[in-house]
Amino acid sequence: HPETCEKYPKQSKHINFELTKRIVDLACKVNAKLIFTSTDLVFDGHKGLYCENDSVNPGSYYAEHKALAESFILDNESNSLVARLSVQLTKDFNQGFYFDIIQKLKSKSKLNVFNDEFRSFTFACDTVRWLEKLKFENGIWHLANTGGCSRSQLAYALAKEYNYDPKYIDEISSKSIDFKAYRPKDTRLCIDKFKTKYADRVVDLKAHINSI
């Protein structure tokens, strides 16, 4: 988690970068395919809809160490795939952003959600299928459901789909909380590269929600 990494930068670098270097070394020795999941947070969030060839500009230790790992992998292991992901959603586990939204709305509790942070929220089941599809690809790929939005927009969409009262949703600014780690405003991912080659695999976020 970015906040934890900001508090413990040495441990963050060890886990997210140093251990990755060791895994790269092992993969090279046995000629194994390396698939590395990175993050949309390697971008500064100033423009949104980032493509694979856009320059990274991490603003937190977590993002910095992920960017270092990306660079090391691409420089040292040609048989590798770097998949940049955004916030993963799942209805199968009792944790995560999706679960928090549903539980709050279901219990008619106040739900504070940011209206000024935009991400490419993606259902993890889609990510798994895409990674399977890309197992023979190399380089950087952005994987995400289309239709990125703010956290508050996602909350309203889920409330509508499940017929929960949206009055419990309270839109707030991320600036109202004293986070230690830098939080980019808009890290939505452009998936044109994936869409061009695997158009039949693209899934829209809202369509996915409507099919739940």
Image (spheres, rainbow, N blue to C red):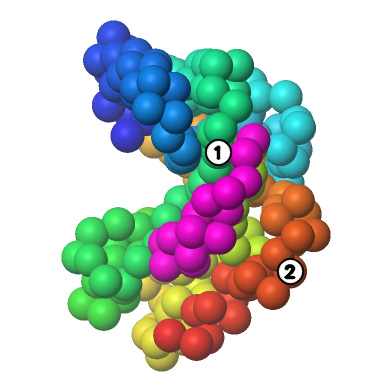
x%, y% of residue 110?
Answer: 30, 65
**Is residue 37 placed above or below 134 in the rendered structure?**
above
- Residue 175 in view of the camera: no
Residue displayed at 53% across by 51% down: 135
Q: Quadrant of the N terminus?
A: top left
Gap in Å between the C-alphas at discs 1 and 2? 19 Å
Is residue 129 located in the magenta-colored stretch of the structure?
yes
Q: Which mark is residue 109?
A: none
x%, y% of residue 13?
Answer: 35, 14
Residue designated by label 2: 199
Q: Work out whether residue 111 or residue 182 is closer to the camera in this orientation and state it.
A: 182
Q: Amino acid at mark 2?
A: Ala
Residue designated by label 1: 81
The mark that comes first in sequence, 1 or 2, is 1
* SS under mark 1: strand
Residue displayed at 71% across by 33% down: 46
